Image (spheres, rainbow, N blue to C red):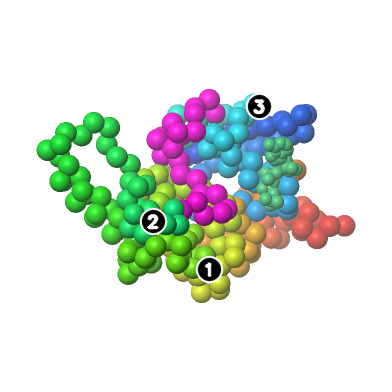
Amino acid sequence: MMPTNNDFILAVEGLTVSFDGFKAVNDMSLYLEPQEIRVIIGPNGAGKTTVLDLICGKTRATEGSIKFKGKELSKMSEHKIVRAGVGRKFQNPSIYEDLSVFENLEVSFPRGRSVMGALAFKRDAEVINAVEEVARTIFLEDLLDQPAALLSHGQKQWLEIGMLLIQKPDLLMLDEPVAGMSVAERKKTAELLRVITKNHTVLVIEHDMQFVGDIADRVTVMHQGKVLSEGSLEKVKADPKVIEVYLGH
Ligand SMILES: Nc1ncnc2c1ncn2[C@@H]1O[C@H](COP(=O)(O)OP(=O)(O)OP(=O)(O)O)[C@@H](O)[C@H]1O
């Protein structure tokens, strides 16, 4: 049976954004299945970051649709998109340096709207459990009291992923998550993403092909705002169109 849009957690169709007539993203389509790790690759300026900006509502599409769990995101505000279950991590960590690892995770926990005082104790236990669970996932369970400023670059990146995870998004978008990381940290990040994907769909922009090979279920190659090729890393690497774009003439 042909898949319908309902089989996809995210269905992007005909997505276009024009900046003063320049189409940074041009009639792009992208379909993600629940629990897959998709990696977008492509040369500088291909439009990769702009696609993530469009999905999270930071940039408004000129044309096209972005359906997430059946809801149209392209007209929604950024905070509503977050509430709908889309988490986005930017390239530079935006953690609170002066707060501890625990506190950084705690402030990211989505608070209930109007919870009665009587429930406060229960909520605290819920927060503590959630913080500890996420801290284990991001390899920081022994550093909960450490100020974030003292973490390594890689640990800060993990903490920021944790700050997204504690909000339980269905879709997690990461822009070059291993940039500046050591080889050991890259390996652990690949491990982390494979654990995360048991409950989340993950969309990653990445240049490091070793890392792409470690994590990707499928790869989407972008060039000049469009999808140039799509499939397994082996398949797209062997695609003459991709070779041409990467190696020039
Ligand atoms: N707000 C904007 N106004 C005008 N042009 C923009 C804007 N945002 C992006 N662009 C242009 O759109 C093109 C695509 O940019 P984008 O950052 O999405 O590429 P990318 O594939 O993420 O590149 P890189 O790998 O270098 O991060 C670039 O030519 C960029 O200069």
Q: Are marks 3 and 1 in contact (CB under 8 Å)?
A: no
Q: Is residue 57 left or right of residue 247?
A: left
Tell me which residue sits at (60%, 34%) in the image.
Answer: 59
Residue position marked by numbered label 1 in the rendering: 186
Which region shows up in magenta? 74-95
Tell me which residue sits at (45%, 67%) in the image.
Answer: 150
Percent x, y of residue 5: 49, 34
* Alpha carbons under labels 3 and 2: distance apart: 40 Å
Percent x, y of residue 249: 87, 57
* Alpha carbons under labels 3 and 1: distance apart: 36 Å
Residue position marked by numbered label 2 in the rendering: 99
Is the C-beta of the residue carrying label 2 under 8 Å from the nearest atom of ligand 1? no
| In this view, the mark in front (3 or 2) | 2
**Residue closer to the observer: 69 or 45:** 45
Q: Are marks 3 and 2 in contact (CB under 8 Å)?
A: no
Count numbered badges in the picture.
Answer: 3
Q: Is residue 194 left or right of residue 24?
A: left
Q: Who comes first in sequence, dot 1 or dot 2? A: 2
Amino acid type, mark 2: Leu
Give the answer, above or below, for where 193 lies relative to 60.
Answer: below
Quadrant of res 176: bottom right
Q: Who comes first in sequence, dot 3 or dot 1? A: 3
Q: Is residue 30 left or right of residue 88?
A: right
**Residue closer to the observer: 38 or 125:** 125
Residue position marked by numbered label 3 in the rendering: 62
Q: What SS does tag 2 mark? A: loop
Q: Is residue 204 visible?
A: no
Q: Quadrant of ligand 1?
A: top right
Amino acid type, mark 3: Thr
Identify the residue at the far right of this view.
249
Amino acid type, mark 1: Arg
